[in-house]
Image (cartoon, rainbow, N blue to C red):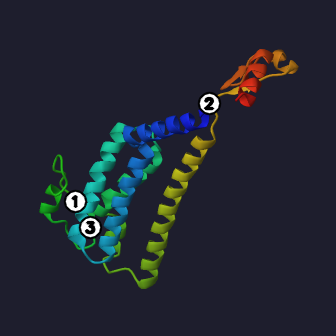
């Protein structure tokens, strides 16, 4: 009977946690999926639809950055720079002005492309090997961003809230390390009995 009650309570908690809302990780993944959709549309030769998705992802990521300023700030900055470059230099040429109004919220006009020394020096289209190299560099950047995200998730999942130090020698410590507290034998007995009680 107790197990059935525990399963029922766990089910209610699980449903309420899901209904509570998404965390920043889930929101970022949704924004990242929009960026991937935009990349796919760009590769299929649909620049206007790709630009609309890039603008949607850019505005969503900017809102995300304002809502969670401490969440993987380097990854967010990298993705914002990536989106800015895609909006500034769309695959089909100059960005159509009506694409700025597709995304809800305030109208964000595309940024005009900046003249860089490489663009003025190499006016001709890059060769096939240069295109492959640029593609590989972009894949490396994306993989590094994904690696950073996964490392942060792993670090957060494995991080302990605090560590309880016990035993006879723990009393000899002058100061406790950060995130640690001193345990007592009474607590160990109570915790052990709670584990085996049922």
**Which circle's residue, 3 or 1, is located before the other in the chain?**
3
Q: Quadrant of the N terminus?
A: top right
* Residue at x 34%, y 71% (from the top left corner): 40
State the SS at label 1: loop
Q: Are marks 3 and 1 in contact (CB under 8 Å)?
A: no
Q: CA distance from mark 3 to mark 2?
A: 43 Å
**Horizontal side of residue 173 vs 102, given as left or right:** right
**Which circle's residue, 2 or 1, is located before the other in the chain?**
1
Residue carrying label 2: 161
Say if residue 113 shows up in the picture: no
Mark 3 Cα within 10 Å, few/some/many (few <14, many 20+)?
A: many
The picture places residue 155, in percent across and down from the top left corner, at: 60, 44
**Horizontal side of residue 76 vs 49, given as left or right:** right
* Residue at x 30%, y 55% (from the top left corner): 57
Please say if 146 is above or below 24.
Answer: below
Residue carrying label 1: 112
State the SS at label 3: helix
Q: Closest to the observer: 30 or 99?
A: 30
Residue carrying label 3: 50
Q: Closest to the observer: 158 or 119?
A: 158
- Tell me the mark number nearer the camera, choosing from 3 and 1: 3
The picture places residue 104, in percent across and down from the top left corner, at: 18, 50
Q: CA distance from mark 3 to mark 1?
A: 17 Å
Q: Quadrant of the C terminus?
A: top right
- Tell me the mark number nearer the camera, choosing from 2 and 1: 2
* Residue at x 60%, y 37% (from the top left corner): 3
Say if residue 50 shows up in the picture: yes
The picture places residue 92, in percent across and down from the top left corner, at: 23, 74
- Tell me the mark number nearer the camera, choosing from 3 and 2: 2
Q: Closest to the observer: 124 or 132?
A: 132
**Which circle's residue, 3 or 2, is located before the other in the chain?**
3
């Amino acid at each position: 009977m107790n197990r059935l009650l525990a399963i029922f309570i766990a089910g209610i908690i699980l449903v309420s946690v899901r209904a509570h809302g998404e965390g920043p990780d889930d929101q970022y993944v949704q924004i990242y999926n929009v960026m991937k959709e935009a990349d796919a549309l760009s590769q299929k030769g649909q620049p206007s639809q790709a630009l609309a998705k890039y603008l949607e992802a850019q505005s969503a990521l900017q809102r995300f950055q304002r809502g969670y300023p401490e969440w993987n700030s380097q990854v967010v900055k990298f993705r914002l720079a990536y989106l800015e470059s895609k909006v500034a230099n769309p695959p089909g040429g100059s960005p159509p002005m009506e694409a700025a109004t597709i995304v809800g919220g305030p109208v964000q006009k595309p940024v005009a492309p900046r003249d860089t020394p490489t663009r003025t020096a190499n006016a001709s289209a890059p060769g096939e090997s240069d295109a492959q190299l640029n593609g590989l560099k972009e894949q490396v950047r994306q993989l590094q961003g994904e690696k950073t995200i996964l490392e942060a998730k792993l670090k957060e999942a494995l991080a302990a809230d605090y560590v309880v130090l016990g035993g006879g020698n723990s009393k000899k410590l002058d100061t406790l390390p950060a995130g640690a507290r001193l345990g007592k034998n009474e607590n160990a007995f109570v915790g052990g009995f709670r584990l085996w009680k049922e």
